[in-house]
Amino acid sequence: MRRTLSARTWADVSIVLALTIIGLLGFEPSFGGYSFLLPAIGGLVLGAATGIVASILRVNVVTTIVVAVVAYFLCGTAIAVPQQAPLFVLPTLQSLSTIAIGTVYGWADIVTLQTPIEAPQHITVVPYFATWLVALVSTSLAVRWLARARRSAWRFGIVLLGPLAIYVASILIGTDDPYQAGIRGVSFAVLALLWLGWHRTGGDNIAQAGATRMRTRKIAGTAVVLAAAVLLGGGAGWWIAPAQDQRFVLRDEIEPPFDPLQYPSPLAGFRHYTKQVTDDVLFTVSGLKAGDTVRLATLDSFTGKLWNVTGSESSADGSGTFSLVGRELPAQSFVTPERRTDVTFTMGEYADVWMPSIGYPTNLDFTAGSALDSTDSLRYNATTGTAVLTAGLSEGDSYTIDATLQQVVSIEDLADVPVAAVELPPVSSSPDIVTSKAQEYAADATAPAAQLEAIRLALTTTGFLSHGRASDTVASRAGHGADRITDLLERNQMVGDQEQYASAFALMARSFGYPARVVMGFAPEIVDGQTAEVTGGDVTAWVEVAFDDVGWVVFDPTPDETDIPQDQTPKPQSEPQPQVRQPPRVEADAEDLLTPVELEESDEDDEGVAFSIPGWVYAVGLSLLIPAMIIFMPLLIIGLYKLRRARRRRDAKAAHDQVAGAWEELVDQYSELGYDVPQKATRVMVAESLENQIGGEHRAFVEHANSPTEGAADTTAEPSQVTTLRPIAVLTDDAVFSGQEISAERSDEAWSTTTAAIEAGRAGLTKRRRIVSRYRIRSARDWASRISTKREDS
């Protein structure tokens, strides 16, 4: 039998959906537009349609949940991820997997995404799932609960929780810049308050004049509420609302999932490129101009052992803070811009998470290789222009970028320009000789640019370049920590390569308090219009210093490659030694005799975890846990409510109220079992109606079920052993209206008899009806109050 929805019910549903849309608009700053509205509105329509149709067809709760989940996945392909479906409609395994991943993990990703949100693909599932769930629950409650129950304010308040959750979520996972906060807040409050104020009917027993007065009062109250909401809400929003930089949003509180400190510092592996893969083609690049350099990583933190990126716990905007991004990357404002477009990188022997790029990329598009399926692993640091692919680059991967480069600025142009007030982490364990040498090299220069240029010239003119190869005339130790920089500056001849000179120059600049950072990358020979092959021998490092209103200006302190003169200190003459039998000679490669790269020690043991749970186990577990919670959590809540209801009735203060409570429990239980309980009828009439519905062999209950000796052995009742429900009603009326004192034994007997009657009514039903009854709640009338009044009157 179908249910017909009243005009008031349709109005309730419309208001709930309108409130949800008002809250939904708050996601606009996060997505940078209205692209999220298509999956969000689709989820809203699907959830509302499922809830309304299930209610009209009188489908039980369990079946409604199953149908809703199936429709969620089948329709989700066309609504949320149409790009993964044939003809943009048909679901595939990939689209279903994306919907599942987005439902479970999208909430964690959305608060770490760099706004505007464009990737990963499963992120569109978040607004789709949120609106689908809210619409399904809210419309189901409005149609099933508000339509047939007493329309009290607290019920409407519970229905409002769904739209309110969407509104709050749009704030928490939004940005510091709210979307029409005042207009949306006032509109939401006014519509919700008016709905709560007009939810009651005018009353069927009120005279026409009284109904007119009530309607007039409601209209006046509506005007007052509207004016108060606009004035007080607008004033509070103006005076109390926090400043944009003080707004609480989750993306400012949660660390991005990628931690670059888990990887070795790129600069620590500098000698790997200059000695082991010198002639290997790491990657090719096209679209550059002569003089352009390729950026690999930007390092602004010095620990005394090495230069590395800043940990996210030290600075929210440091070089170690990487956020999920899409194809469009955040623009860099602190730069004197020069454009590059369609610069294509194709990987060869290079395999790492740090992505070669130029300047500050504004657009990145993967075009070939396994990286096409790993776009969700792209992270980007807008401050340094550094990109990483957590899945790692491999041979054959290709991508094209558009970028903004810092223009080359001469020292003369920087003569009167101060350094920028950029906050960088303080350096630690810098050698004392760095400060003294910086003062010596800067000499009488006073302007920042002049001091830095003087230091650069001192390093390039008095130092010598050596990569520490076996063929070099003078050995050059690897590393760039405090001990290596001390050795560089204390020797009669400064010998090193870009790793040491860039580190020394950056430390000298920082000793003056200037914001300086080390950049590692490649400087291949570029011919305009041709594709360049980048080898390990092209690796380099330079220093960038921030100047006010200009940007990060490049300083290259590494000397050109020239012959290194030998120290003139004569070697002592060797004295002949007695012959001693030598151990067998071990052939060793000259490269193996060189000092290895110094890497930062790790506090963690190298031993792997003995046992780890695969990721698919978590996915499967969550996929099973969420439906289980949807099904069994309401069952638990309703079960606790029914248990509390029965205990409250049985523990009533007066014995006659306990007997009446037993009858109330019987009526409620039969109503929840699906029997039609007459309203505004006497107990005897209710009993007769229920007996007629039970019918046949289930019309009576087994009296001897109360017997501890026979109840367990025999479950079949003979006609002479049964009693109908009518005597229970008569005995209850007698206990309530006779005016006699009721003993505790009489109360216990009433409850045991009623319990047996309930079990008899349950036994005559199908298993499905018994399961559905566990999800039903019948709000009984306040029998205790009404009965006590009648007892006093009698």
Image (cartoon, helix red, strand yellow):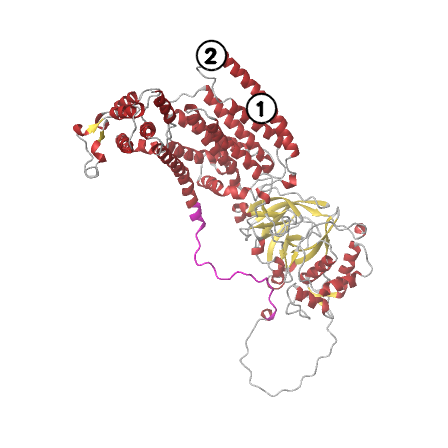
Q: Is residue 13 above or below residue 557?
A: above
The disc, 2 or 1, on the residue closer to the chain's N-terminal end is: 2
Q: How many marks?
A: 2
Residue range highlighted in magenta: 593-619
Residue 225, numbered label: 1
Is residue 603 shown in magenta? yes
Q: Nearer the viewer, residue 322 or 651?
A: 651
Q: Is residue 97 above or below residue 156?
A: below
- Left or right of residue 406: residue 172: left
Q: Nearer the viewer, residue 436 or 287?
A: 436
Q: Nearer the viewer, residue 188 or 615?
A: 188
In which quadrant will I find the C terminus?
A: top left
Query: Does residue 3 appear in the picture of this structure?
Result: yes
Inter-mark Cα distance, 2 to 1: 26 Å
Tell me where residue 208 appears, x and y as whole percent: 48, 11
Name the image quarter holding residue 440.
Answer: bottom right
Helix, strand or loop for the magenta stretch, by majority: loop
Q: Amino acid at mark 2?
A: Ala
Residue at (46% x, 17% y) in the render? 203
Q: In the displayed image of the protein, which residue is found farthest to the right? A: 444
Q: Which residue is mark 2?
A: 207
Asked whether disc 2 touches disc 1, contact meaning CB atoms under 8 Å apart, the reply is no
Q: Nearer the viewer, mark 2 or mark 1?
A: 2
**Amino acid type of disc 1?**
Val
| As drawn, 752 above or below 560 | above
